[in-house]
Image: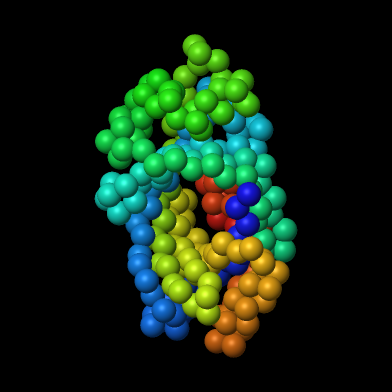
Amino acid sequence: MEVEVKLRLPDSNSHQKLSIILASFHTKTLIQENIFFDTTNSKLSSNFAALRLRFYNLDSYCILSLKAKPIMSDGISRVEEQEEPIDPKIGRMCVAEPGQLLGLIESSKIIQRVRREFGVGENEVLVCLGMFRNVRQVFDWKGLKLELDETIYDFGTSYEIECESKEPEKDKKLIEGLLKDNGIEFSYSEANKFAVFRSGKLPR
């Protein structure tokens, strides 16, 4: 179970201001390309699951992930998550020919789970649902790994600060304090990035 604090920033000015405030705590920046797949009859998304290939920093590495049963409440996200690294070249082959994805990485435990748990048969193929990009700045601040995201969809750009946490209520208050003390507006995220992507519009 992945548990994260997710707070949405209203605009690029808020994002830039927070980036400057946290600059001395910066550890790395990740350029992420997120590509999603499902069956032709939506067996995964209809069961609140998302199968994703994520490429990092111009294909330096690639992660296959399956997320399921997401719950979002008061800026805290809880979701079942399973991840596996795969060869970026194999990942790109899957993107080029999504119908071959299940066969190209059939030994994957995630793919085996997709078949078993979501009833994806041997003769079924996957299709590509599309993609979005994310620029993630990572900061080590007060023992927390803060992730400041600029997410670029075809229909607009959104901004968010996230933090994976074992004590989400406590850590949420710390992050809220950081934002309030520096006059940065925010709101609780009400949907994860995949849900925003599928909706085709930015959150209000």
Q: Position of residue 57 (x, y in %)?
A: 30, 54
| 143 over 107 or under it: above or below | below
View extreme (bottom): residue = 181
Q: Quadrant of the C terminus?
A: bottom right
| 157 over 12 or under it: above or below | above
Q: Position of residue 169 (x, y in %)?
A: 70, 69
Give the image quarter of residue 108.
top left
Which is nearer the eye, 24 or 84?
84
Determine the residue positioned at 44% across, 40% down: 84
Drawn side of residue 118 relative to residue 11, left or right:
right
Give the image quarter of residue 8.
bottom right
Coloring scheme of the render?
Answer: rainbow
Determine the residue positioned at 27% across, 49% down: 60
On the question of residue 200 being in view, the answer is no
Q: Position of residue 191 (x, y in %)?
A: 63, 53
Drawn side of residue 85 relative to residue 74, left or right:
left
Drawn side of residue 42 relative to residue 24, left or right:
right
Determine the residue positioned at 48% across, 66% down: 147
| 192 over 180 or under it: above or below | above
Marker count (numbered): 0
Determine the residue positioned at 62% across, 78% down: 174
On the question of residue 66 being in view, the answer is yes
Q: Position of residue 105 (x, y in %)?
A: 40, 27
